[in-house]
Image (cartoon, rainbow, N blue to C red):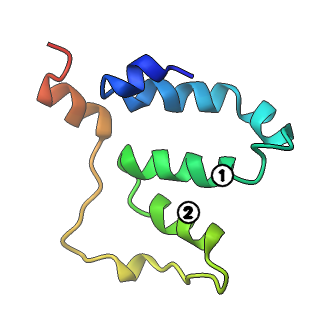
Amino acid sequence: MKKEELEAGIPLATYAAMLELEEQYLDSKVFAKIYPEVRLNFEEFLGLPLAGMQAMELISPNGIKTKEASISNSFKPVNAAQVFLSKQIWS
């Protein structure tokens, strides 16, 4: 699933493939239980600040209560695509 791109440091290709195949993953006996966590981990890596906490809630036996207020006000969301483009990682 876009392994070469992922290994080259381009996780967005793998994430896009995951979204395209989401229905198949959720229908799979092997992947249905872990797919939501993997997707959230990719989303955290791609810049969605609460996705990692949501992933941890999925695997926590007692559940972690996620509140936006628990994230420092010094953190601000940014457009991941603009950050990628500004770093010129493909040059």
Quarter-of-image position of residue 74: bottom left
Q: Residues within 10 Å of mark 2 (few under 14, many from 20)?
A: many
Q: Residues within 10 Å of mark 1 (few under 14, many from 20)?
A: some
| In the image, residue 65 above or below residue 53 | below
Dot 2 amino acid type? Ala
* First in residue order: circle 2 vs circle 1: 1
Q: Which residue is mark 2?
A: 55
> Residue drawn at (38%, 82%), measured in percent from left and top?
69
Left or right position of 83 against 23: left
Q: Is residue 85 left or right of residue 20?
A: left
* Image point (47%, 80%), residue name: 67
Q: Quadrant of the C terminus?
A: top left
How many numbered marks have been drawn onto this rendered protein structure? 2
Q: Secondary structure at mark 2?
A: helix
Front residue (pair 72, 14): 14
Tell me residue 36's x, y (percent). 66, 52
- Can you give x and y, in whole percent of width and height, for residue 5 in the image? 40, 20
Say if 68 sits above or below 47 in the image: below
Q: Identify the secondary structure beneath mark 1.
A: helix
CA distance for labels 2 and 1: 8 Å
Q: Nearer the viewer, residue 71 or 58?
A: 58
Q: Position of residue 35 (x, y in %)?
A: 67, 47
Write the residue at 37% across / 82% down. 70
Q: Is residue 14 above or below residue 74?
A: above
Of 46 and 59, the residue lying toward us? 59
Mark 1 — residue?
36
Q: What is the three-letter code of the residue carrying label 1?
A: Pro
Q: Which of the 4 quarters of the picture holds residue 86?
A: top left
Q: Contact (CB < 8 A) between labels 2 and 1?
A: yes
